[in-house]
Amino acid sequence: MSRERATALLLDLDGVLRRWDPAVAAGVEREYGLAEGVLGEIAMSWGLLQPVLTGQVSHAQWMTSVADALTPSVGADRARAAVQEWQQYRGEVDPDVLAFVREVRAAGVKVGLGTNATDLLDADLAALGLVGELDVVVNSSAIGVHKPAPEYFRAACEALGTPPKRVLFVDDEDRAVSGARAAGLSAFRWSGPEGLRYLRAALEPTPD
């Protein structure tokens, strides 16, 4: 029995379509006398991250919490300044992935962005020049549930107007890939542009 060809693509943002230069955070930490890696460690702690990813708090409130956590070590003013400088950098688009998105959309495949993100996502997409490059955007903070919950993938497939078995999901995190598969989607664990060859093949029509 041959598989059904995917007719829609759902891409993660961070680690797939957007990449981050770790040197930026490292430079801020050195400038302000912070421990190496502490900005990401605090920001990604689940107690602070989960509420912002589900829309319970804003991106600005999340960053205030990060600055509050840094205050005992460097003082309130320096903590706020460090976080502000760190947040000015909004990452970079992976040109290979963007070219692929344009290629498959031109071939008639719907492409959605499926991301755990904050209320800053729309501004980020504009700053990155991605407005109009995707058919739908499914933001966890807007729908109130995050990957890898099955409800997230259900909402994403509904936004794409495509049944799960016809959606190919791409993410750089194993938990998200496993969650997508459990929800009935095809899923591919992204590790870099070398994966584009597989994705192109997966989206090709199956011979009759």
Image: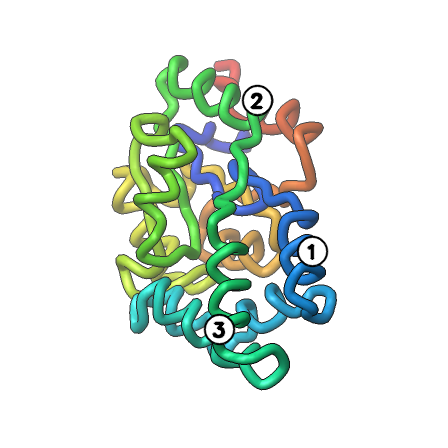
What's the mark number on residue 200?
2
Say which element carries label 2. Answer: helix
Q: Quadrant of residue 159?
A: top left
Amino acid under disc 2: Arg
Which numbered tag is attached to residue 5? none
Query: In the rendered view of the protein, which quadrant contains the N terminus?
Result: top right
Front residue of this view, candidates 39 and 134: 39
Residue 181 placement (x, y as % from top left): 52, 52
Residue 147, by quadrant, is bottom left
What is the basis of the colouring in this image? Answer: rainbow
Depicted 105 relative to depicted 115: above or below: above
* Lower sequence index among marks 2 and 3: 3
Q: Amino acid at mark 1?
A: Ala
- Three-letter residue code for mark 3: Asp
Mark 2 closeness class: few <14, some 14–19, many ≥20 residues within 10 Å: few
48 left or right of 173? left
What label does residue 77 carry, if any? 3
Mark nearer the viewer, 1 or 2: 1
Horizontal side of 11 relative to 177 (left or right) equals left
Q: How far from the left and from the top, in percent, is residue 203?
A: 51, 24
Residue 26's disc number: 1
